[in-house]
Amino acid sequence: MDSLYVGAARDLITACIDLQKLNKYIRDHEGMPPAFFMAIPGESAPLMTSLAVDDNDKISLSLGRGYHDLDEEFSRDPEGVSAFFFTCTIGTKSSLSDQALEWYDSIEYEPDGILYPEPLVYDDFFDSVRCPQAGEIICFLYAVKAVIELCKRGTIMTEDFRERRPIVFVSGHPSCPLIGIGEELFHRNTFAEVEALPSMDRSIRELPVIDTGWTVGAKKLGRDERGGQTFMVVELEGETTSGKKIPVNGGGLISLWKTLETLFSTGAMGKPGIPARLRICHPGLAPMAKTFIGDMVEVTQADPTDSMAVLLNLE
């Protein structure tokens, strides 16, 4: 294991212990937080994420590949692909498996205390268990850090989070990730696949930040939900015109983000760049923008019902 992944493995140990410190906070809330999907860099599709606290107040964090239905604990991919299950548990050194002890030896690191996280990967519905490979260590680290941040925000304890079944988008450096909460992907009792993991073109972050503001919204024009065309609308700060209307190739969240990326690259006023102030009237696009560029510019969530005049006049 090279030095990059050794460092990530050590960070993972520390992060798991930091998550364990939140056990009383999680235990004090009535009921457990629901399972939700988390989109993590390097994973081709979002992972089902859940927390558990045992009778000794020890936390475990689990991630599932190949899951598409949160209401069925072990639902398989419709094509028959097996689900893979990752878990990080907390125990003492004496409780560690021989594999875990070898893993600790390989990274030449032990915690400063009695708690020993044990990251494990179960393949093919628990048919075999092993310690994580290098890329899986990064995945674990993203997830644990993200859950810590969500707990600190109080997000996963809210009724809104329980009812909406949102998707959490994670990006940035795994030891200090950026977190965004996206749109609802499906309704209860309705089978649906999860959207592919979104990404941002690296060239976008190289664009200049322009001292201006945009208000962005989206609307589908058509008689029913299946037909019609989705448009992104942009109102430019200080402009007296009705704004810009851009057709979106597809109506999903990722399509909207790609349309916004194109607008950054081409420039809403003929000059490529990212506006310093971005006000978004869309419940899923705003947190995605915060995740990807919120460290560069000011991104605010606007009420979808409080959209600009151009949205009202699209018909």
Image: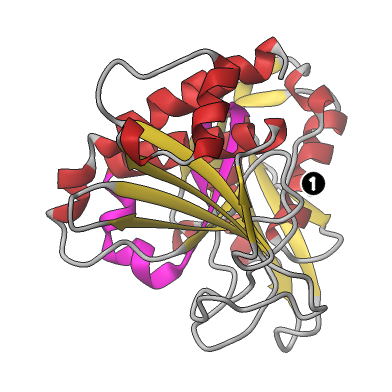
Closer-to-camera residue (235/60): 60
- The three-letter amino acid code for the residue at tag 1 is Lys
Q: Is residue 213 visible?
A: no
Number of marks in picture = 1
Q: Position of residue 147 (x, y in %)?
A: 41, 43
What colouring method underlies this structural image? secondary structure
Q: For residue 298: magenta?
A: no
Quick one: quadrant of the N terminus? top right
Q: Residue at x 68, y 58 (%)?
A: 253
Q: Position of residue 290 (x, y in %)?
A: 54, 36
Q: Position of residue 179 (x, y in %)?
A: 50, 38
Image: 277 above or below 58? above
Q: Residue at x 17, y 46 (%)?
A: 25
Q: Is residue 182 visible?
A: yes
Q: Residue at x 59, y 44 (%)?
A: 288
Closer-to-camera residue (132/255): 132
Q: Residues within 10 Å of mark 1 (few under 14, many from 20)?
A: some
Provide the residue designation for mark 1: 258
In this view, the residue farthest toward the left is 28
Image: 4 above or below 35? above
Closer-to-camera residue (166/20): 20
Residue 135 lies in quadrant: top right
SS class, disc 1: helix
Image: 114 above or below 65? above
Left or right of 47, for residue 19: left
Left or right of 221, for residue 173: left
Residue bounds of the magenta highlight: 154-181
Q: Position of residue 271 (x, y in %)?
A: 83, 23
